[in-house]
Amino acid sequence: MHYLALLLGPEGGPDATPGTPEFDAEVERYAAFDAAAGAVVAGGAALAGTAEAVRLTRQGGAGSAGGAGGGAAAGAVVATDGPFAESAEVVGGFYVFDVADLDAAIDWARQLPAVSTGAVELRPAAQYFPHAEPGARWWVALLWERPEAVIGPDSPEWDAAVAEHGAFAEAAGSALTGGIALHPPGTATTLRAPAGELLLTDGPFAEAAEVIDGLYLFTAPDRAAAVELAAQIPLGPTGATEVRPVLAFE
């Protein structure tokens, strides 16, 4: 079974700034984790900070993102440049684990450096589309949604959303390099270890007004092209799509 592990933490520190010794040390810690986890890691990426992000919302909507749960809605898409003042902690990256069950996912997630510096949110995948090693000119589209607006599999609404996203994937073609749709936020488990003792919390990270409903990975030659492609992702009236560059380590 596949689980998405979202790496959450404060933004703007030295360990989040490429080129600093702290950043290099953080990269080494994650490289050591990757080596230990081996085939358990089915995918993942590190993301640039929100200063390089663009948030897409539906004009007149409440401002969050429709992943597998969002349908298209009438109205123009509005782009807002980051950083976003309301974000005390942000998604700095993610892993996808291929494990037998939640207990196994927790056993691996607790070893991630983000557990001691921020948090890791685990969510089971409803659909997972594998991706290769991220490279230059890769981007992520994080699909945000209000928790109460997220829909689950095995419903007519889910089937309709899958059809809409299938049409988007067909239009995007080879530019689309991977993606994941998630089960509703009630299935989340959040891990923290601020003082070295692991704390597990059922449900999504903290008191967030919106949750990640899924994500896409894709390639684009520049920021404008990335935003143009992401604007085609089905977006509900209360949804938002956050576009950010992927950090490539070569």
Image (spheres, rainbow, N blue to C red):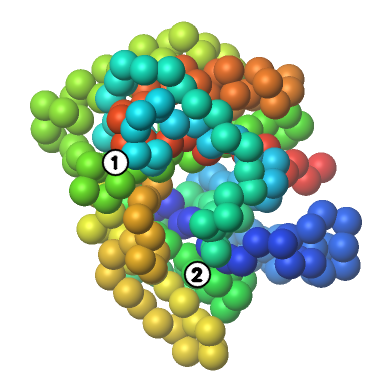
Residue appearing at x 40%, y 26% in the figure: 59
Tally of numbered tags: 2
Residue that numbered label 1 is attached to: 126
Type of amino acid under label 1 = Ala
Any part of residue 27 in sight: no
Residue appearing at x 43%, y 18% in the figure: 76
CA separation in Å, label 1 and label 2: 22 Å
Q: Which disc is residue 238 wearing?
A: none
Choose between 51 and 131: the one closer to the eye: 51
Name the residue furthest front: 60
Indicate the position of residue 96 as horizontal and vertical percent values.
48, 50
Asked where in the image residue 152 lies, by quadrant, the reply is top left
Query: Measured along the vertical axis of the image, is residue 226 above or below residue 133?
Result: above
Which element carries disc 2, helix, strand or loop? strand
Which element carries disc 1, helix, strand or loop? strand
Indicate the position of residue 35 as horizontal and vertical percent values.
66, 61
Residue appearing at x 36%, y 12% in the figure: 167
Residue that numbered label 2 is attached to: 119
Task: Between label 1 and label 2, give the one nearer the viewer.
Answer: 2
Asked where in the image residue 140 lies, by quadrant, the reply is top right
Choose between 81 and 39: the one closer to the eye: 81
State which quarter of the image contains the C terminus: top right
Any part of residue 185 in sight: yes
Indicate the position of residue 33 as horizontal and vertical percent values.
63, 65
